[in-house]
Amino acid sequence: MGGTFVVYSDKPQLVLELIGFCTGAGRKAVALAFDAAVAEECAAKGADKVLFFNSGINLPEAYCQQVAEAITGEGAEGFIVGSTVRGREMAAKVAALLNWPLASDVSRVVAGGGELEIERLTYGGAVVQQEKVRLPAVVTVPPGKFEPSSKPKAGAEVVALSAEPDGRYTLLERTRIERQGADLANADKIVCAGMGFAKKEDLKLAFDLAAVLGAEVACTRSVAEERKWLPPDVYVGISGATVKPRLYLTLGVSGQVQHIVGARDSGLIVAVDVNENAPIFSAADYGIVGDLYEVVPTLIDALKNA
Amino acid sequence: MANVITCYKWVIDEKDIRINPDRTVDMSRAQRKISEYDKNAIEAGIRIANRLGARPVGLTFGGPEAKQSLKDALSRGLEAVYWVGHPFAAAADGMVTARVLAAAVQKIGDYNVIVCAEGAGDTYARQVGPRLGALLDLPVITAVCEVEVDGQYLVATRKLEDYVEKVKVSMPAVICVLPEICEAPVPTLKAVLAAGKKPAQELTPQFLGLEEADLAPGISVTGVLGYVMNRKNIILKDGDVAARVKELVAYLKKEGVI
Ligand SMILES: Cc1cc2nc3c(=O)[nH]c(=O)nc-3n(C[C@H](O)[C@H](O)[C@H](O)COP(=O)(O)OP(=O)(O)OC[C@H]3O[C@@H](n4cnc5c(N)ncnc54)[C@H](O)[C@@H]3O)c2cc1C
């Protein structure tokens, strides 16, 4: 098919997935890198060309003008960006500078000649929308959609560019987030606590059940943001974490779409809720209709003896 | 007096969306509301305006029905609201929306901060804020969970996947705020009554100098399907608690998760 896509992500693994997408779509992949090691890795693992912004970078977003110019310089018909906070900002600004459309957070993307067919979720995950995007265009792609490329291409080169950042930005501080709660992204099993819990102390039931199952404890946004019973990094959903455990077991969670969208790809979904009509039951493989205060102690005992 | 402009969207209330068994989507009975995230953004805009001694105003772009949002927006404490209501909004993508908002912001003029929510409750594309900033040639900070004013500068704390960053930009600037920036109080009755007396100004695309080409989207929707979860839906509701639990444990064993 020919043509060039420029790719960028601040997550090195995601860059390789985006290169994989370009190669699969029959396009030349030009990777942007702001770090020498990442530039070398891209060149060694399948980029046709790497543009290395050798600028002592601390905020890639402060280089959008240069990125837009580089994309034009490559004669590219697409800018494919990893969907992270930084990536989305870069994608949107560059789209504006180039006057290109931008399809965000696509759950599926197929590149044809002259256009892309994409799928994305809207209304908090209740609706799947199919869209046609005319090229040239910008797309942001979440992690895990494409196989990372791994083999070098003949003649791959790294071109170093020097660039002045936009002087209106100053990075004052960068602090790694110390996770206060569980590492949900890698959890094998998760117990999720919802507003069905009457008091903070009662969450002990969720932790006890988690201990028996070997699970981590997560919660809904209401439990974290309204009640502030658990840290915000452990709430699951469209505005929180996306998780994919083998077992996702909810206690007193109604199952609104904004919540369950974050756990949709779990292996098995199990729900405990008093309300037989709660939407969580249509999202669950197994469910118990019942008061969690009765069900959980019984379940803990049964699991201990199982 | 300088303006702090908060952009908001009048969206379909997702809780009124019906998904039919054939996965078609029924929005015919859906009410509209100010996007939840935008309610927090409006409050954030008001607080920033207070700190700057500026005037907090709202700006929305939508179909003709967006007119119904004005009173709600004003009752949240904005002093004036500007709106662009036109049927082409139904087909607008982020590119068109940002162009319309940029033209409107320039028309409103004398602004020092533009506040957007990180994303809208319907599309959640998270592109309009940074896009608007680039069109207006203003610095942008996204994913903001805290913001302070420091003389001519905004200092914002932003949340990335693994890091928290403190970034300083010169004003005027665009910030895109996360809902945790501040709570969005429910308007008081007094505020609702006062809203009727505050100014709301329509800005038509012609008045903004927008031409047909500016309003042509690059993305078209070709299909809309309800999301369905294909799950087993085995719901245990009969017998006493012990019996239901026993049955569940047997299933969990069979599934190999315990
Ligand atoms: C724009 C937007 C974004 C959002 N993003 C998120 C998000 O990322 N994550 C998120 O979680 N939410 C999110 N929400 C909120 C979401 O819509 C729901 O309001 C929230 O998930 C509800 O939390 P919950 O299930 O804990 O509470 P509720 O909806 O109040 O449900 C509590 C459940 O507990 C049951 N219950 C009560 N007592 C008992 C008992 N004794 N035993 C058993 N069951 C009991 C009730 O029957 C009910 O089903 C968002 C909302 C909006 C509008």
Image (cartoon, coloured by chain):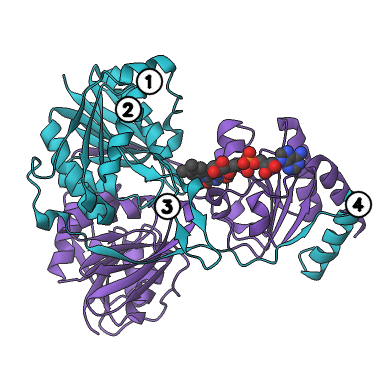
Q: Which chain is purple?
A: A
The location of residue A47, given as percent across then percent down, is: 31, 75
| Dot 4 beta carbon under 8 Å from ligand 1 | no
- Left or right of B20? Residue B8 is left
Residue drawn at (19%, 38%) of the image:
A168
- Do circles 2 and 1 both sit on a common chain? yes
- Left or right of A269? Residue A156 is left
The answer to whether residue A56 is seen in the rendering is no
Callouts 1 and 3 close, C-beta under 8 Å: no
**Would you place residue A268 above or below residue B18 in this image?**
below
Quarter holding the N terminus of chain A is bottom left
Which residue in the structure is indicated by mark 4?
Answer: B242
Which residue in the structure is indicated by mark 3?
Answer: B28
Question: Which chain hosts label 1?
Answer: B
- At label 3, counting other C-alpha atoms closer than 10 Å, the crowd grade (few under 14, some 14-19, many 20 or more) is few
Q: In the structure shown, which secondary structural element does the residue marked by tag 2 occupy?
A: helix
Callouts 4 and 1 close, C-beta under 8 Å: no
Which residue in the structure is indicated by mark 2?
Answer: B71
Callouts 2 and 3 close, C-beta under 8 Å: no
Point out the quarter of the image occupied by ligand 1: top right
Q: Residues under labels 2 and 3: Cα distance?
A: 23 Å
Q: In the structure shown, which secondary structural element does the residue marked by tag 1 occupy?
A: helix
The location of residue B210, given as percent across then percent down, is: 10, 48
Marked residue nearer the N-terminal end (3 or 4): 3
For the residue marked with disc 1, what is the amino acid?
Answer: Val
Marked residue nearer the N-terminal end (1 or 3): 3
Marks 4 and 1: which is nearer the front?
1
- Do circles 3 and 4 both sit on a common chain? yes
For the residue marked with disc 3, what is the amino acid?
Answer: Ser
Callouts 2 and 1 close, C-beta under 8 Å: yes
